[in-house]
Image: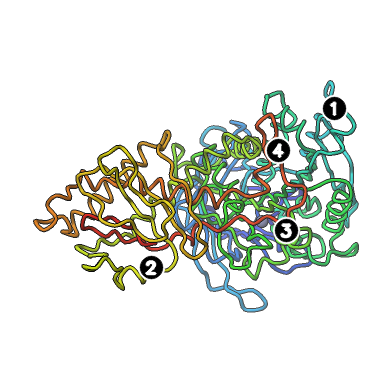
Amino acid sequence: MNDIDFESRFESGNLRMAIKLTDNEYDLILRNDINANKYAQWFYFKIQIKFKEPKRIKFNIINCEKADSPYSKGSRILQYSTTTNKWSRKSILNKYYKNSYSTFDDKNLYTLSFSVNLGEENLNETVYFAYCYPYTYSYLQEYINKLVTQKNANKIMNHEVIATTLAGNNLDMILVTDFLGEFDDIAGRPCIILTSRVHPGESNSSFVIHGLIEFITGDSDSAKLLRKKYIFKIIPMLNPDGVINGCFRTNLRGKDLNRQWKEPSLQVSPTILSIKETVKKTLLSRNIYLYCDFHGHSNKKNFFLYGCNNNNNKKGKTTLQEIILAKLLGRKLDFFDYASSIFKIAPGKLKTGRAVIKKEYDIDFSYCLESSMEGISIGKNKNTFFTPALYKEIGYAFCNALYDMVNQEIFMSILYDLQLEEALKLVNNVSIINNIDLDDDEGNTKTEVDKIENYFISAYGNSGNGHNSGNTGSNKPQKHVQSQNQINHIHLVNQKDKLKLKPINKLKNNDKLNDKFESLITEKIDKSGAVNEKSEKVTKDKLSVSNKVLLGVSNNLSNNLVSPSLKNINQKGMLEPARHSSNNNLVNFKNRLPKVRIYLNLNIYLLL
Ligand SMILES: [Zn+2]
């Protein structure tokens, strides 16, 4: 007689078979995605205990397909007890390893092995196990119904079924905006399109977009402002059939819908076809400011962003426009992982939502936001597992970051931080060259200086009479800076373009970064031995150029970084999103930063 009953025949359930090995151990087999013959990874099943006293049971899921798993790095299985009515991660001895089985096409299979103490609190309990917190299609339907029937809902949202799936389920879209505005105002609002759950096994992405919907339909000032500013078209579940049937990756045709965006069809991928129609229809009447598709990541921790290189950014360099949302999210939540973020489209991702939306429709901002199905490794939540509440926080943070994207002051402060961040990186490229005479006896410039081809920053000081002694129009370094004079200006000159940028005299609110920059420079100068007897008058004090260097660099960057489209600041201080994006030419800043050399010998020059 069985002392455990297994059941997975419920919505989103997946467990094909349980094989009893001993009284304390079971092998479990997951069902492949329907019509796909692969992608076994998502599981969701329940067990009913029938034994008479508590015991430890070992389960081995023996047909997992992914080579890498967080379970091999200490993660634990999610379980839900009907005694406590809570999800927890109490399993022990989690292991994930390659086993001796293989798929029909000879791919290796892996075993996820875990043990659970059962019946400790209640011998009659039912325990559910899941790959990630389940979020079902029915739950979404209930939520949408609750949303649209609440008081005054019609003032800020409506709900449409924009297509039906292969199995006849709804593809829901929630449209959110402030409908009480003037007709012309509403008609001119740019659109933000947000989609989620194209991959059924990434149930965490549903909690993220759930949080986002909660926020954007809520009462906060930023939600109100965003509703006045934009029209949100939110499609919370792109693959209802896959979700209902407990698939990991595909729809009922066995297709990964996130590879169907290039040529979707009514027969194979009607939901994707419908989204593209929505995009096209939207573009007939208004600009689309941003698109984001929400996903879950099974292996990496934290949450992060995948963006696109701009259509006009042929060199594949990173621009501010590409990273701005990531920078803003990083300010909102300390478990945003910039290091895991990518701002280019890899060749294998060309058929994904974010790539196709970007490339085919030239949308300014097109992203995929990934959140870990497992845990957090940075910030104050370090070493904890994600919870539905934390996923929802990502949704809230996303809205707050959107709010910041249209706030000039915040945008400029991000810009400023970025400049400083990049300026600090310069320090790593600084090399100190001692005792270089820039002029020969006749005052002719030596070849060393002639080598200066592109940019240099010249530092020059007050000659003592209170006037700036620098030749601000010069495209070569100022001669003979007197060491006893305080260096008070840095000019950056682009020799090629004869472009001269104005110096700025004060760095606001960034003393910490200034100090860091200065101490690193000083350390470098110390190590170089450049300050020696020969140049004894050149003290570190006098060489305290770092702030000014930073100013010069910062100034250079700020002049180059501000996108024409982002310069459209209206009277309320809000950044107007560009209606046409084709002329966006944010200049790459990362790779603009060249090597820096500091020449010491009464003259300080930075050769860029
Ligand atoms: Zn995904």
Dot 2: what SS?
Answer: loop
The residue positioned farthest toward the top in the image shown: 151
Q: Which residue is mark 1?
A: 181
* Picture coordinates of residue 81, whole percent (x, y): 60, 37
Viewer-proximal residue among 394 and 569 = 569
Placement of the C terminus among the 4 image quadrants = bottom left
Eye-nearest disc, 1 or 4? 1
Say if mark 2 contacts mark 4, CB within 8 Å: no
Question: Residue 179 appears at what percent x and percent y?
Answer: 86, 29
Asked if residue 115 can be seen in this view, the reply is no
> 10 Å neighbourhood of mark 1: few (<14), some, or many (≥20)?
few
**Nearest to N terminus: mark 3 or mark 4:** 4
Report the Cα–Cα distance between label 3 and label 1: 30 Å
Which of marks 1 and 2 precedes in the sequence?
A: 1
Element under disc 4? helix
How far apart are labels 2 and 1 at the CA level?
58 Å
- Determine whether 68 is above or below 514 in the image: below
Residue that appears at 84% across and 61% down: 269
SS at circle 3? helix
Q: Position of residue 577 (x, y in %)?
A: 72, 43
- Of callouts 2 and 3, the N-terminal one: 3
